[in-house]
Image (cartoon, rainbow, N blue to C red):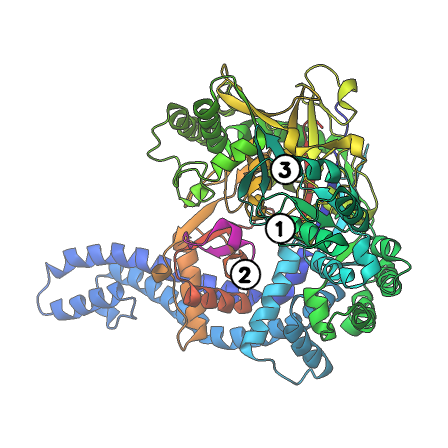
């Protein structure tokens, strides 16, 4: 029985790879390569001739100084003189050497003019490529200043941008063609449609549609000012913090900064908690507090201000409880609402803010064609102008349209489905399932989970079941340097020197699995791991396809936990729902009510909300949600897992812990379905997904195969690591006054180092934290084509600015389009 097709989306570069051919300097590159080849040949032959001359010099008399001079010229690759004094056979060999030397001199002589001519052509081609709709439109969002410079250049071809402007344009253009950067219109997003026949993948030749989203920050700003309207403030929903729980004579809850706080329970506090249990409007909660007489002699819990009688006192009490973290006042619109400003308008109606909110949503709903890329005529510009008109009515300041585009609005280019022939993909997908198994032992969070299991055993006893929030409070005070430390993975080799037997064994397993792959022993690399290595469940793999001699092959760029993560971000915009992935053979996850789950099934639940970042917006992928402080759920109450009810259960037999919901009698698997790094989540959310879910299994900032250099590593038809080189900046030729000579020197260095003509270059700076790499453009890989003089100049700029070694990675695949698929492999 064949497996069903996995859910997938595709991202396609905004320019074909062939577009970069216009930036190349083919004749200059050929001539530079010829000079390098001739120099190598002259050097090799000079060594042979030098040895022969050494024998002749020893047997001569008066001609010895001439022969010594000839030998020195050959050694220094200079044209020798008075060759006629040599013995005939040797003279002929030297004359052949001279003919090669003269050819090299002729090539060197013409190279400067050829390079200058092709450089002018390359800069002209750059202007044309920057004018393509995908680049021109995207630049208006990515860099308003650079966009303004481009628009001036397009309006006046005779105007020459500054070198720094040209360099920036080059970086953007090459990125659009060589990478699938998920930013603005630089990349087009497509649903993947699996078909029974045809080519392995087919990118449709159709202009994309551009949709616009408002940054989550704008919505949060709007929600912060809406309560200035009294009737809107009264409609806020009041609830106990989802993380508040009673244990004995103490009530524990998280403060706004994440630290857990415990206060003594009193009869007044217990009464107050009961009154505020469940969700209710702010004005209803005030009425309850006033009627119960709690406003004047409320709980002495340090979370309230002094108060007098009546509703004003109740208002003070409730506000103090909110500031302290025990109680929350939220706008009852889910963070993942598909049309958030419409929902806010409906909630605020009939108050005055409803009108502007509705008009903002209508503007956001209007998708537009990419057109010619003119930033002033785009859908984003229309939304920006509407925001400029509506924000003052909400009491918010207005910023210039270019700043609105860059800081407040998010654009995405959507295209029709990419057709993928499933029969062509099946062998590679089978190998991708093997990769999923291989990655389990390389899970970066395994050390944390193993250490947490040991700590829970020590804190609460073997086989114990402790409240999650008690465990969290203790983890927050864990000693630095252990796997429980948030900075543990910042070390280059975090398991080096580990004394725990499991951690030592884990380090050995990882090294052995990589060695088995590099040695061609794939089955050994996939051997059964210890019981404490957990199956990762469904995994989203980011792969780039290419055709090899044995058919379709894949390059793995990254992989993280699935359950829709990485796919639902885009199906939210595409309007498609991901299909369920096939089971891998283990116990099924479940989305039905707990009582209807099959025996052994775990309950998968998403973290709700957006945590303040648009990268976390996504379509619903799972039928269950956790409750979480500050977040508004979109699932019905019967599909919510209360955070305060969860336990951490220790399995003494396997030496692991699991998240357990006693009321349902199920293991719970938390899912962070957003695209923001787990390292940027609040501490409690981060612990949930890192300790009990599946996070990144491999990522450019945390690769499963960590190394400085080495050949390509494959597992079947899947490349796990591209060929890679690390070079010291001092070893790289630097540009001087002679551009032609520099081009030759660069190609000589490439040839000696074995580096391909096209590659990605990144500066290695280990001191930069992983959670900052995504926001630091200096550390992003830059595509370099050493057959393009503008690209060679960019490489020289990288070397000049580099504060560390340079990491060069082969540009694999080298296909017609840069295509990356996010494919979910494994069980839902």
Residue at (64%, 52%) from the top-left corner? 320
Q: Secondary structure at mark 2?
A: helix
Residue at (66%, 43%) from the top-left corner? 629
Q: CA distance from mark 3 to mark 1?
A: 17 Å
Residue pointed to by mark 2? 777
Which portion, as a residue range, is magenta?
A: 761-775
**Residue 186 on the magenta segment:** no
Up/down of 15 relative to 502, above or below: below
Counting from the top left corner in percent of width and height, residue 64 is at: 12, 67
**Residue 770 on the magenta segment:** yes
Comes first in the chain, label 2 or label 1? 1
Q: Is residue 203 at all visible to an observer of this figure?
A: no
Residue pointed to by mark 1? 304
Counting from the top left corner in percent of width and height, residue 368 is at: 85, 62
Mark toward the viewer: 3 or 1: 1
Comes first in the chain, label 3 or label 1? 3
Q: Is residue 568 shown left or right of residue 576?
A: left
Counting from the top left corner in percent of width and height, residue 633 is at: 75, 41
Q: Are marks 3 and 1 in contact (CB under 8 Å)?
A: no
Counting from the top left corner in percent of width and height, residue 813 is at: 60, 46
Residue pointed to by mark 3? 244
Q: CA distance from mark 2 to mark 1?
A: 45 Å
Q: Which mark is residue 262?
A: none
Comes first in the chain, label 3 or label 2? 3
Mark toward the viewer: 3 or 2: 3
Give the total number of marks visible in the rendering.
3
Q: CA distance from mark 3 to mark 2?
A: 40 Å
Determine crowd level at label 3: few under 14, some 14-19, many 20+ residues with C-alpha closer than 10 A.
many
């Amino acid at each position: 029985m064949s497996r069903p097709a996995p859910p997938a989306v595709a991202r396609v570069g905004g320019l074909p790879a062939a577009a970069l051919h216009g930036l190349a300097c083919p004749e200059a590159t050929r001539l530079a390569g010829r000079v390098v080849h001739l120099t190598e040949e002259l050097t090799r032959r000079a060594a042979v001739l030098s040895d022969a001359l050494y024998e002749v010099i020893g047997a001569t008399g008066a001609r010895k100084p001439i022969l010594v001079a000839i030998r020195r010229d050959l050694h220094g690759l200079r044209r020798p003189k008075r060759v006629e004094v040599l013995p005939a056979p040797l003279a002929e060999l030297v004359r052949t050497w001279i003919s090669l030397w003269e050819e090299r001199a002729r090539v060197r002589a013409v190279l400067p003019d050829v390079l200058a001519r092709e450089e002018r052509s390359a800069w002209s081609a750059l202007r044309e490529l920057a004018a393509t709709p995908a680049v021109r439109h995207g630049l208006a969002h990515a860099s308003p200043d650079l966009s303004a410079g481009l628009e001036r250049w397009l309006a006046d071809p005779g105007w020459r941008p500054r070198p720094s402007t040209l360099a920036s344009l080059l970086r953007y253009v090459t990125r659009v063609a060589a990478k699938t950067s998920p930013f603005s219109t630089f990349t087009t997003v497509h649903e993947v449609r699996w078909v029974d026949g045809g080519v392995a993948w087919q990118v449709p030749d159709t202009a994309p549609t551009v949709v616009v989203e408002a940054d989550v920050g704008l919505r949060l700003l709007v929600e912060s000012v809406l309560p200035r309207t009294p009737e809107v403030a009264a409609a806020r929903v009041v609830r106990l913090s989802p993380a508040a729980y009673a244990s004995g004579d103490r009530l524990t809850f998280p403060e706004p900064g994440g630290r857990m706080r415990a206060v003594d329970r009193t009869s007044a506090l217990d009464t107050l908690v009961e009154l505020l249990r469940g969700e209710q409007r702010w004005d209803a909660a005030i009425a309850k507090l006033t009627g119960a007489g709690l406003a004047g002699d409320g709980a002495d819990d340090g979370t309230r201000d002094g108060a007098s009688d009546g509703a004003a006192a109740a208002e003070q009490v409730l506000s103090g409880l909110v500031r302290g973290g025990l109680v929350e006042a939220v706008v009852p619109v889910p963070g993942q609402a598909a049309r958030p400003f419409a929902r806010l308008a409906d909630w605020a109606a009939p108050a005055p803010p409803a009108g502007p909110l509705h008009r903002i949503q209508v503007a956001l709903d209007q998708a537009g064609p990419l057109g010619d890329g003119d930033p002033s005529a785009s859908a984003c510009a229309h939304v920006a102008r509407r925001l400029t008109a509506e924000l003052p009515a909400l009491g918010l300041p207005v910023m210039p349209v270019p700043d609105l585009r860059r800081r407040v609005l998010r654009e995405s280019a959507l295209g029709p489905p990419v057709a993928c022939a499933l029969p062509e993909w099946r062998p590679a997908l089978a190998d991708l399932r093997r990769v999923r198994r291989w990655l389990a032992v390389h899970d970066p969070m395994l050390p944390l989970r193993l250490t947490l299991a040991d700590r829970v055993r020590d804190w609460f006893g073997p086989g114990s079941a402790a409240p999650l929030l008690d465990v969290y409070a203790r983890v927050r005070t864990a000693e630095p340097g252990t796997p429980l430390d948030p900075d543990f993975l910042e070390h280059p080799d975090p398991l080096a020197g580990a004394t725990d037997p499991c951690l030592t064994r884990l380090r050995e397993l990882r090294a052995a699995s990589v060695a088995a792959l590099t040695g061609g022993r794939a089955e050994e690399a996939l051997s059964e791991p210890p019981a404490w290595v957990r199956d990762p469940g469904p995994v989203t793999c980011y792969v780039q396809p290419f055709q090899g001699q044995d058919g379709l092959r894949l390059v793995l760029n990254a992989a993280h936990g699935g359950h829709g993560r990485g796919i639902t971000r885009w199906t939210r915009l595409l309007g498609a729902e991901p299909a369920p992935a096939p089971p891998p053979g283990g116990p099924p996850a479940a989305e039905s009510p707990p009582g209807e789950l099959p025996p052994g099934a775990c309950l998968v639940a998403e973290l709700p909300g957006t945590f303040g970042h648009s990268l976390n917006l996504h379509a619903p992928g799972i039928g269950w949600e956790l409750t979480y402080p500050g977040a508004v759920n979109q699932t019905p109450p019967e599909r919510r897992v209360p955070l305060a009810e969860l336990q951490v259960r220790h399995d003494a037999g396997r030496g692991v812990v699991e998240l357990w919901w006693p009321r349902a009698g199920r293991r719970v698997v938390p899912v962070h379905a957003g695209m923001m790094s787990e390292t940027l989540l609040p501490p409690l959310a981060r612990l949930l997904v890192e300790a009990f879910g599946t996070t990144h299994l491999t990522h450019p900032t945390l690769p499963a195969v960590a190394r400085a250099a080495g050949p390509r590593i494959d597992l079947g038809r899947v490349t796990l690591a591209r060929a890679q080189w690390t070079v010291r900046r001092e070893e790289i030729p630097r540009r001087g006054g002679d551009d032609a000579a520099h081009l030759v020197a660069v190609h000589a260095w490439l040839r000696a180092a074995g580096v391909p003509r096209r590659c990605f270059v990144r500066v290695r700076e280990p001191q930069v934290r992983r959670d900052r790499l995504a926001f630091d453009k200096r550390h992003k890989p830059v595509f370099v084509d050493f057959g393009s003089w503008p690209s060679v100049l960019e490489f020289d700029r990288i070397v000049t600015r580099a504060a560390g070694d340079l990491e060069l990675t082969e540009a694999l695949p080298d296909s017609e389009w840069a295509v990356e698929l996010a494919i979910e492999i494994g069980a839902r």
